[in-house]
Image: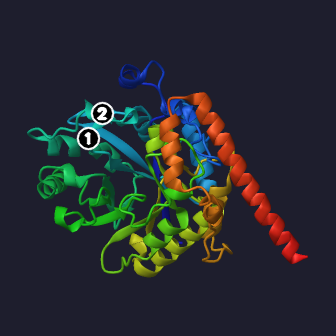
Amino acid sequence: MTLRYIAFYLPQFYPFPENDLWWGKGFTEWTNVTKAKPLFDGHDQPHLPTDLGFYDLRLRETQHEQITLAKEYGIDAFCFHYYWFGGKRLLDKPVDAFLADSLADFPFCLCWANENWTRRWDAAEQEVLIAQSYGPGWEERFADSLVPFFRDPRYVRVDGKPLLVVYRPQHIPDARRAAEQWREHCRKMGVGEIHIVSALTHGNDNYEQYGFDAGVEFPPHNMRVDPVNDILPSYEPYNGYAVEFADVARDCLSRDRRDRRIYRTVFPSWDNTARVKDRALIVLGATVENYERWLKGASSLTKKDRAASEQLLFINAWNEWAEGCHLEPDRKFGRGFLEATRRVKCGVSLVDGNYDVHPLRSSSERQKSVAPSLKWKVAARLHNRPLALRIARLAYRTVIGVTRWGSQSRRSRGQR
């Protein structure tokens, strides 16, 4: 098949000095992952790994195991997030080690994560830890840092051109000029032409304005769906945004990409509670079957709409554990998302187009027996009184349970 599945890959799973300074000695992505707590009854947190365990990317065996798993289940390449700040690189060891490792026999490409690092995990986005700067001559220095990767025979190419994703081109002072200089430098260095792709993030949906060659979807960015916060059965204050997986998938699949070179992207699940706690974006109904439906639909459209050399489909992500967004096996689904990926890739998927509704949605009418506004008011009043809050939550759950039991009893009598 010409269709290629490319999974975004986060290299944050090892300690390094800056993270030690900012977050405490030994901090890695696993630190946030393991601290996650459920925000409501039935909330699937924390997400914990199985097959690969709490790995350390300083060990070469880790990436070798990841490559073996990816190949077995139909993933064709990793797209490493690349952190370059005006010449200073972070999270560079796993990416550089991959480049130098002849045993890492797997295609790859880079996504430049060109945004400031802030204390957003502490809800302090205004505090910048390291800024993304664009000083004189930055364009050539950035392009020069990419040349060793572009020259590697494993690097992903489109029509023979190395592919570079830029996460936020709208932050670059003059992105069109920057792209021209990157191209010129790569020609001068003997790399030849390059294929520059804009991630469609933070409201940006126009890669053409930057002089780029293509765009790539980056869900849940730019989604156009209504929240369903009111169905969450919790007494804890929730300041985030809850949506249905089915709504997100249908929204993305409904977008016509025939006349513009935009690569589709899907995700298996999304829930960044581990990073931002009660401000999380939570996608309800992220089951293996629903992911398989979205991937199957996106694959079909890609094969229909794109030329053979452009049949790329991105998956967000291979290992974004703190965003609840990973193909790697976990304790709830095991290898389920990987197995679904292989079924679609091999053309043997049997799922239909009818997305499963999250149980909270199907029971939302019963939940409305306690008005959401009243529920949040009570929670706010009792937030600083833990014992009283626990008692109120217990009473609320009891009411819901009795209501559910009563409804089931009535249905049972009616069936008899």
Residue under label 2, please give it. 89
**Quick one: label 2 or label 1, which is nearer the N terminus?**
2
Q: Locate the C terminus and report the quarter of the image it occupies.
A: bottom right
Q: How many marks?
A: 2
Please tell me how crowded label 1 is: few (under 14), some (14-19), or many (20+) other residues with Cα within 10 Å: few
Give the Cα separation between the discs numbered 2 and 1. 10 Å
Circles 2 and 1: CB distance less than 8 Å? yes
Task: Give the vertical position of 175 relative to 207 (above or below).
Answer: above
Residue under label 1, please give it. 145
- SS under mark 1: helix
Residue in view at x 60 percent, y 51 percent: 233
Task: Give the vertical position of 264 relative to 373 (above or below).
Answer: below
The three-letter code of the residue at mark 1 reads Ser
Q: Quadrant of residue 38?
A: top right
Residue in view at x 65 percent, y 67 percent: 343
> Which mark lies nearer to you, 2 or 1?
2
Q: Is residue 380 left or right of residue 233?
A: left
- SS under mark 2: strand
Q: Locate the N terminus and report the quarter of the image it occupies.
A: bottom right
Closer to the camera in the image, 247 or 342: 247
Q: Position of residue 232 (x, y in %)?
A: 57, 53
Closer to the camera in the image, 155 or 89: 89
Q: Farthest residue toward the right?
A: 416
Closer to the camera in the image, 346 or 301: 301
Closer to the camera in the image, 258 or 232: 232
Answer whether residue 47 is visible to the viewer in this image: yes
Q: Position of residue 44 (x, y in %)?
A: 62, 47
Q: Position of residue 399 (x, y in %)?
A: 70, 51
Q: Position of residue 37 (x, y in %)?
A: 58, 37
The three-letter code of the residue at mark 2 reads Arg
Answer whether residue 151 is visible to the viewer in this image: no
Task: Tell me the number on the disc at residue 239.
Answer: none
